[in-house]
Image (spheres, coloured by chain):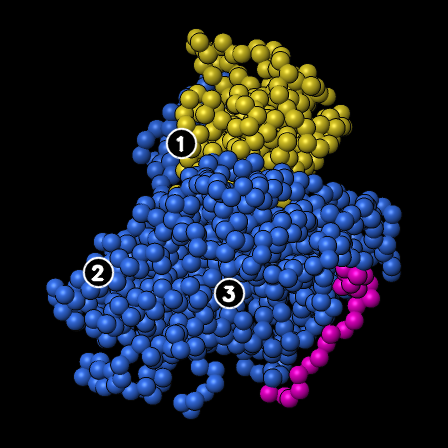
Amino acid sequence: MLNQVKPIEAYFIEDEPYYLSSGREIDIFTQAYRNHLPVLLKGPTGCGKTRFMEYMAWRLKRPLLTVACHDDLTSGDLVGRYLIQENETVWMDGPLARAVKTGGLCYLDEIVEARKDTTVVIHPLTDDRRILPMEKKGEILRADPEFMLILSFNPGYQSIMKDLKPSTRQRFVSLEFDYPEEAGETAIVTREAGVDEETARRLVHLGHMTRNLKEKGLDEGGSTRLLINAGKLIQSGIPPRDACLSAIAYTLSDDVEMQRSMDEMISSLF
Amino acid sequence: MESEPHRQEPENDLLSLFVLPLEIGSRMYDAEDLEEQGVPGLLDGLPADTQRVLLHHARTLISIKPELGYHFLFMSKALLERIDLSSLEEWVSLVLDIFDVKGLNPAKEFILELDRHPLFAQYWGKGVSFHEVGGILGNYVNALGHRNFHLEPSPIHYTDTLTIYLPERISTFPLKEDNALLYKIMVTHKSLQADLGTYRLNPKEIPAIETAAGSEVHEHPNQTKAPPLLRFFTLFPDHVLAEDLFNFMETIRIEGWIEAQLPGLFREMKRLKKELGMKRPDSSDLPGKSRIMENLIMQWLGNSQPFKETDLGEMVRKIRRLSGSLNRPEATVQDTAYAVTKAFRTINEIPGFYKPIAPVSFMGILKPEDAERGRRKRREATRVQFREELAKMLEDFPQCEQVEIEIPGTDDAHSSKSKTPSQQQIPHELLLDGNPVPVPEAMRKIITEIYEDLGAIPGAYMAIADDMSGHSFRSLCQTPTGTSNVLSEHGKGVHVYDEWDYRRKGYRKRWVLLRESDAATGDPAFANNVLERYRGMIQTIKRQFERIQTAQRLLKKQKEGDRVDLDAAIEALTDGRAGLTPSERVFSQIRRDRRDIATAFLIDLSGSTKGWINDMERTALLILSEALQVLKDRFAIYGFSGRTRKRCELFRIKGIEEAYGEPVKERISGLSPLDYTRMGPPIRHVTGILRRIEARTRLMITLSDGKPDDYDIYKGSYGIEDTRQALLESREAGIHPFCITIDKAEHSYLSHMYGPANYVFIDDIAKLPVRIPEIYRKLTT
């Protein structure tokens, strides 16, 4: 079982992912890739960072290895470890090592969630050395010219425990992401949720309303992803108001008064 | 005294209702007593129609028992905030029923207790009060557009474009939901009056309207200084009719927007309009002009009853065609004005006067003068914001003395029709010395607002911004006279600090004197009161804090622990097989996180926090301190105030190692507003205090009510930049600064000063006691 590792080919993205550009991010990313510079994607949750990565992987025709970071993630999970197979030990590369070897794009999603020591293994990969020391194997991997490291990070969290250290941050080219403009977002919701344009327009309008309340009762406004979720529920036959309450209002706030305010917005729109 | 000429007309004279002397309780009152109590003016300010209805009911009550009528007159204004004029009859008959069955005192109680009386709730309990929906609608209206509004209860429903004034209570409909819906429609309608520019009639259009309106319309020369809308109304011989037509037609334009953007609300509104239509008073004995107006309203409400007279019917159709054209997204207030002009000419063909018809409650009234004042206030605020933003952009061009600023496309913005902002081209770039510079988001919002207001950015705005950026800064320094305001450098507890001068990009050495001293104690009754009153809330917050405290974490790869960490064990095993030294960290442990946090709270005690803010600051501090007992986090509280660089005061309310107890409570109770807000020095001082504390996480939370501001030069950019610098120093020292700002609106300088995500602003001061513990909890987990 264990040796059935997915071949690296499986990490190539065959079909063009739907991505609507809203600035120069594609150009900048492409040039960062050509210049061997790591990239930091900043932006609120659910605004399209991960989708952008899929799109860029497809466009650059490189495999994409995504790691969703969590607080138990260790450097071994990224670099690799020995496993026992049929009475012998076999080294198994972690996603970072695989990307380094095969010239893939390694995308560490929500990096601040990972344990602080994890970020240290990526440092030598992010300057001109471009190496990955594999302590356990006693090897130093030199990165393939096509290899690229990408981190994502949401600066909106107001917790001091979740900030990125300057020593890490200052190694990256940063791309700022935000929710798309109204027309673009409507197009995205229409396409992704499969709803008609009018419904999408109303959902986007609702999204804008909730974003007007950011820091005025809401920690964050409704993301494009939430709007798409609501759209999907509507498309599956849930009445719009219930869909929006469940997918957006109750998700964004536990405060009863705020939920009722959002209910008023929803009932105004639908 | 008794023969004052301004006394009301005899039929309105409340005194004449009573047979004097009047016996109330065991006392006799004569005319002079009643006058002293203000009886003659009890109904002043109410519309004549309403007064007439009230008088009618007062007479009924007086004829049965004069004392009931007497109390009724005193309560009548408050009563009308709770029930409709049309429900008054029912209310009066209930009073009389109680009187018949139970006697005078219960009937009197029923009158005096208003909606607190159980019977009242039984009959009119379906009403909704402002306090029930105010909070919900406040969020709703702020979500609706990019502007922020305040909601306030008031006997008159209107907006000055800053605040929306709403009735204290609505009980028009038998269903609670419908009454709440009426509130929502009112709020939406008023916010759209502001957003869609009901009050932004272009004064340049007035002469053209004058011409279009024909000979009967002409403007008084002394009117030209008045707000454009008021000028517009006074163009007409009967400006009440013009105003009613305008309000009606603007509502149709606003409704068009609602139909397009808020279809759900539009649907509900249609239903409610029909209900409102059924409640309209009979109009058959109104004069001709009023009947036309009433018919227009009725048809619009969806209860059409065509005229028998064909000529009147034709007139209504003509006006409906005019107003129908306003139901387009591109229609503007100028279009409404032209339509009103035409409609007025049509109605004016009918002889006779116009008697104002019953208003439609959610349309409210128009107050052009108040709106103009509101607009000025908003304009001033945006102008200042614009200057600050621009000055910030200009700082990147320090080398040039003169910066040429250009806004692309400003010339065509002067087109005669004020477009809605979405149609307008808000520039994405500014030209600084001919180089395009992208407009930051905060700036774009401000520019949108200026465009909405003025149609373009006046050149003067940019000249001043240039001045502010420090290229040719004029000194504002005035030191107050007298020595008592100055601290001595060698005084007890006095510290000397540098201050950042952004114009020279350097520190002014040994510039500020700050004294640290113990805060004065106050009346412990305040603290006890708060702790009693907020007991429930404190319990809730404590429970929330307990949950943080008991948060458990599974620590993997430990040298010792209660169980084997399977992943680590396998790894060690395989490492061993592969010839590596296996790790001995193969256990897992469940451990409660040790919180090692030290926090300093810095409380703004400037004069502007006087009153309500200060009360809530003290309340919030007490609640927070109570709750923090659960967490055992170390915390300090300091208050600060300043008056020039020679006298900054820092008051120790609770030292970081000091236990929370009676002395601290007394010091919190004793906090009172003092002078100005010189924020840099206290931040520097507290940074020093925190720097000496051993803690994994050191946090400095500042609570203030706005911008740094001191008596001397410490204003505007200077104050903001020094505060920013002090915060940067604090961050360098490994401290996390965070700011809570109490303000009505978010300002871009906050983000500049604290950095994004390092501040939060609270617009509703009443929420402070809940929000501060919540913010603290979020920050530290």
| Letter of the chain shown yellow in the rendering | A
User: Is residue B513 left or right of B48 when viewed as pictured?
Assistant: right
With A185 as the anchor, is B435 left or right in this view?
Answer: right
Identify the disc placed on residue B602.
3
Query: What residue is shown with label 2?
Result: B94
Specify whether residue A219 is painted magenta.
no
Determine the chain carrying the residue at label 3.
B
When the figure is inspected, residue B405 is found, relative to residue B484, above or below; the finding is above
Which residue type does callout 2 highlight?
Answer: Leu
Residue B335: x percent and y percent?
Answer: 67, 46
Residue at image location 70% in from the left, 59% down from the top: B217
Q: Is residue B465 magenta?
A: yes
Residue interval drawn in magenta: B460-484
Of B430 and B545, the residue lying toward us: B430
Say if residue B112 shows up in the picture: no
Q: Mark 1 sits on what residue?
A: A242
Residue at 52%, 53% (x, y): give it.
B288
Amino acid type, mark 3: Leu
How far apart in space, not on screen, are marks 1 and 3 (Cα)? 44 Å
SS majority, magenta: loop
| Distance (Cα) linking label 2 and label 3 | 58 Å
Tell me, by letter, which chain the rendering colours blue.
B
Where disc 1 sits, the SS reads helix
Amino acid carrying mark 1 in the image: Asp
